[in-house]
Image: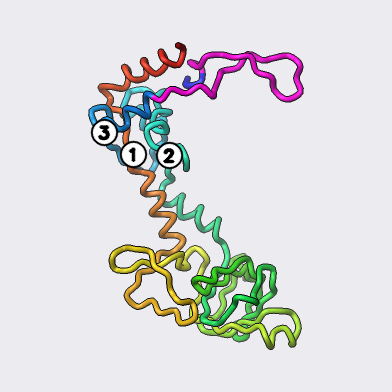
Amino acid sequence: MYFQRFPFVNYNFGDNEANTVFPNISAYIDIVDQIKNEVAFYEKYTVLDGDRPDTVSQKLYDTPDYHWTFFFMNDGLRESGWPLAEREMRALVKKRYPHRTVTTQSNIASNFLPGTFVTGKTSGTTGIVIERNLDLGQIVIASDKNEAGLSNNFGQTELIVAGTTAEEQAINVANLISESEQYNAPLYYKNTSGVIVDIDPYNQTTSGLVPTTIMEDNINFNDNLKEIIVIKPSKVVSIISEYFKLLKA
């Protein structure tokens, strides 16, 4: 419905010689942007698990056709899309971050580079370095799989070595202080005031600091998207009518 109301223009697609009559989707009227700062025109809404734009539109306005207004009213939705149900978000984060993250106090600035083969000296787990976070002393490793198809763990406090020869492994050594799923590894630390702070990766002193994991950060971001503003039901018809009137002007 939304693009059906747009003015039409002649548009040339690719190498086609003939023009095609097509809605001018670049047309834009900022009336919705203006009213989202006027409290008299909007109210707050919390997106529930299972909500879709069309179902929320139906719930609020007795029609699914006004779903597009939510994206105009909320920059977060426009930029990042509709929030997911928490179980869907958790599944997505696990899929996006499927590896193991090990943490060390060792100096890894010049070794354990992406693409390097690594071995756990105690666990025997092997894998390939995917990336490093030198600020947190982290190495992300795509480890070999077990019979269930899951990534094998490294030991929480074992030595890992990099390289395929004895000579390489003798000089590329890191002593682990922790190991976890990639999505459960700390992404940053906050102090008691809730401010993100740096840590010293060579001593890993985090007393009094609160870690935020990759999973938690993604869940928090998704939850923030759920708090939206919507046009008041009593105002929506007049605002949308004015929007399309100006669009055709």
Q: Disc 2 marks which amino acid?
A: Leu
Look at 54% across and 23% down and name the residue there. Answer: 25
Look at 51% across and 81% down and name the residue there. Answer: 105
Q: Tell me which corner region of the image, top left, top right, bottom left or bottom right, holds residue 123.
A: bottom right
Residue of label 2? 77
Q: Looking at the picture, how far across and down is residue 206, in whole percent?
A: 38, 76
Q: Tell me which corner region of the image, top left, top right, bottom left or bottom right, holds residue 159.
A: bottom right
> Under tag 2, what secondary structure?
helix
Indicate which disc, 3 or 2, sits on the residue closer to the N terminus.
3
> Under tag 1, what secondary structure?
strand
Q: Tell me which corner region of the image, top left, top right, bottom left or bottom right, holds residue 39.
A: top left
Indicate which disc, 3 or 1, sits on the residue closer to the N terminus.
3
> Under tag 3, what secondary structure?
strand
In the image, residue 229 above or below residue 8: below
Disc 1 packing (10 Å; few <14; some 14–19; many ≥20): some
- The kind of secondary structure the magenta stretch mainly shows is loop
Q: Looking at the picture, how far across and down is residue 217, in whole percent?
A: 42, 58
| Number of numbered discs | 3
Q: Which circle marks residue 43 in the picture?
A: 3
Q: Disc 3 marks which amino acid?
A: Glu
Residue 66 part of the magenta segment: no
In the image, residue 193 above or below residue 52: below
Residue 9 part of the magenta segment: yes
Look at 52% across and 14% down and name the residue there. Answer: 7
Measure how far apart labels 2 and 1 are at the Cα level.
9 Å
Q: Left or right: 224 with respect to 181? A: left
In the image, residue 215 above or below residue 209: above
Look at 36% across and 66% down and name the residue there. Answer: 190
Residue placed most toward the observer, 209 or 44: 209
Q: Which residues are magenta?
A: 4-30
Q: Are marks 2 and 1 in contact (CB under 8 Å)?
A: yes
Residue of label 1? 228
